[in-house]
Image (cartoon, rainbow, N blue to C red):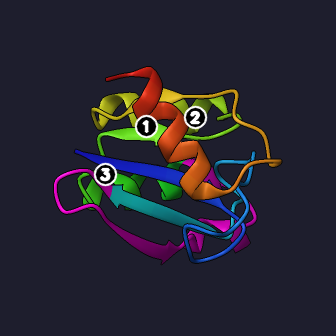
């Protein structure tokens, strides 16, 4: 299973970002391989449509679960259509790896 976390940086040690469409990176954790991969969020710099563009990137990477602070309506619709479960409410006080570990501990 692949989990994506909205992030301020490109590693599991980076801070979590509360904004889905405007985060700098997505850090993706694969529970099967236990590897992390970071991808730049090209939607971040768009004037409009950042959320749906970011959703498209995660759908293409076959992400199954998104861990973030909050998601806008248009992005939410795109993520749901793409089959991605959205888990919100995480704060930027956590590191990416802490968000992943917290989610896995609560859902296993």
Element type at marker 2? helix
Q: In the rendered image, is residue 20 in sight? A: yes
Point out which mark residue 74 bears: 2
Q: Position of residue 108 (x, y in %)?
A: 31, 23
Asked if labels 2 and 1 touch by Cβ distance under 8 angstroms, the answer is: yes
Quadrant, the N terminus = top left
Picture residue at 57% right of the left edge, 70% below the top: 41
Q: Earlier in the sequence, mark 2 or mark 3?
A: 3
Point out which mark residue 78 bears: 1
Q: Nearer the viewer, mark 2 or mark 3?
A: 3
Asked if labels 3 and 1 touch by Cβ distance under 8 angstroms, the answer is: yes
Q: Which residue is mark 3?
A: 59
Q: Is residue 71 left or right of residue 85?
A: right
Q: Position of residue 97 (x, y in %)?
A: 55, 56
Q: Position of residue 96 (x, y in %)?
A: 60, 56
* Residue 13 picture quarter: bottom right
* Residue 42 picture quarter: bottom right
Q: Residue furthest left?
A: 32
Residue 96 included in the magenta stretch of the image: no
Q: Is residue 69 left or right of residue 41?
A: right
Quote the CA–CA distance across marks 2 and 3: 15 Å
Q: Position of residue 77 (x, y in %)?
A: 47, 29
Picture residue at 75% right of the left edge, 45% below the top: 18
Q: Residues within 10 Å of mark 3 (few under 14, many from 20)?
A: some
Q: Which residues are magenta?
A: 30-51
In the rendered image of this protein, does residue 77 appear above or below residue 39? above
In the rendered image of this protein, does residue 71 appear above or below residue 11? above
* Residue 35 picture quarter: bottom left
Element type at marker 3? helix
């Amino acid at each position: 299973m692949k989990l994506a976390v909205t992030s301020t940086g490109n590693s599991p040690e980076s801070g979590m970002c509360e904004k889905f469409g405007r985060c700098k990176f997505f850090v993706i954790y694969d529970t099967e391989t236990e590897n992390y991969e970071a991808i730049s969020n090209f939607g971040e710099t768009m004037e409009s449509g950042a959320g749906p563009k970011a959703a498209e990137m995660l759908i293409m990477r076959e992400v199954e679960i998104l861990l973030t602070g909050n998601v806008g309506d248009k992005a939410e619709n795109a993520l749901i259509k793409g089959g991605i479960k959205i888990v919100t409410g995480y704060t930027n006080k956590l590191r990416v790896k802490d968000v992943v570990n917290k989610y896995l501990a609560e859902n296993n």
